[in-house]
Amino acid sequence: MLDDEQALIEKLRRRDKAAFAALVRELHGSLVRVAMTFVRSRATAEEIAQDTWGNVLASLDQFEGRSSLRTWIFRICTNRAKTLAVREARSTPLSELDQDGEAPVDPARFDARGMWAQPPEAWRDDTPEGVLDRAQAMEEIERTLDGMPPMQRAVITLRDMQGLESVDVCNALDISESNQRVLLHRARSRVRRALEQLYAEKDG
Amino acid sequence: MLTCQQITTLITDYLEGRLPVMDRARFQLHVGMCKNCRRYLRQMKVSVAVLGMMPPEPVPDNVMESLLARFGEWNP
């Protein structure tokens, strides 16, 4: 377990309100997003996220640090969501994976030999900071995330936004490692396309 | 020799270290010689890094209040 994570757990156990508030701010939106994978309505997902915090508090003393704290919290969330999903009679939408043909790049941009016919343009300031400094970049990414099928959104949220390990994401979402990789690839490719579009609209 | 289109399909497998050794070598060979694919790979990496820097969605005030109230009553 990381030292700063141990310190955070100690703070929570000492009832440090600020530490709890900071953790909620960091994770709550992602919990709602992940819950949306299992249930239909945003309101139910919000409820699941709030219940998750209740369960976190109730079990924190039993938390043994076999996984990271964040992984543990996400797992509580998905377990709760799965229970409700059964009640709502909604199955996990792995059918997303059946839809093949979500190409990372429009096939029309390659020639007959599979080489670039319309290669990617350079992005000015192509550093993460440079991208985020661009007007509309954050809004565009948010829009892209909102437009993703739920499983893609959950995978990219947990992996790239929350920094969970792939094995923990697979456990939380009950998917195989290779399915996880397919979803991650589609989701990341969507984000790159959205940013490319943004640069193309605004002079590169 | 891998095509550029194949590179765009294999990037996440490559970044996740899941390409078999020979494919990994082919991938690196192609990217080493192809400026466009180098650029594409860089844009994918930048996209991933940007996601890691996105600020969290704001928590609605009423939600935060009710969670803090629960925390206040917490009696483990």
Image: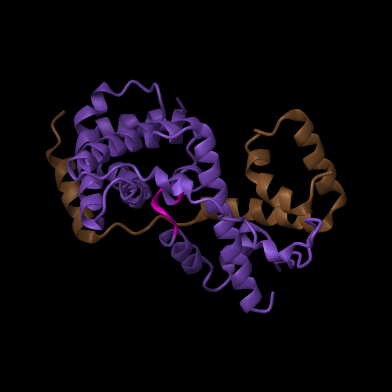
Question: If the image is split into quadrants, where does the N terminus of chain A sit?
Answer: top left
Q: Which chain is brown?
A: B
Residue A204's place in the image compared with A158, above or below, is: below
A7 relative position to A184: left or right: left
A194 relative position to B62: left or right: right
Q: Residue at x 29, y 39 (%)?
A: A77
Q: Name the residue nearer the viewer: A11 or B8.
A: B8
Where residue A34 sits in the image (x, y, percent)? 35, 46
Where are the magenta residues, as a range? Answer: A148-152
Where residue A161 sits in the image (x, y, percent)? 48, 48
Q: How is the image coloured?
A: by chain
Question: If the image is split into quadrants, where does the C terminus of chain A sit?
Answer: bottom right
Q: Name the residue nearer the viewer: A32 or B58.
A: A32
Q: Name the residue nearer the viewer: A135 or A74.
A: A74
A151 relative position to B51: left or right: left
Residue B72's place in the image compared with A203, above or below, is: above
* Residue B61 visible in rendering: yes
Does the segment drawn in magenta span residue A90? no
Where residue A10 sits in the image (x, y, percent)? 32, 29
Q: Residue at x 36, y 46 (%)?
A: A93
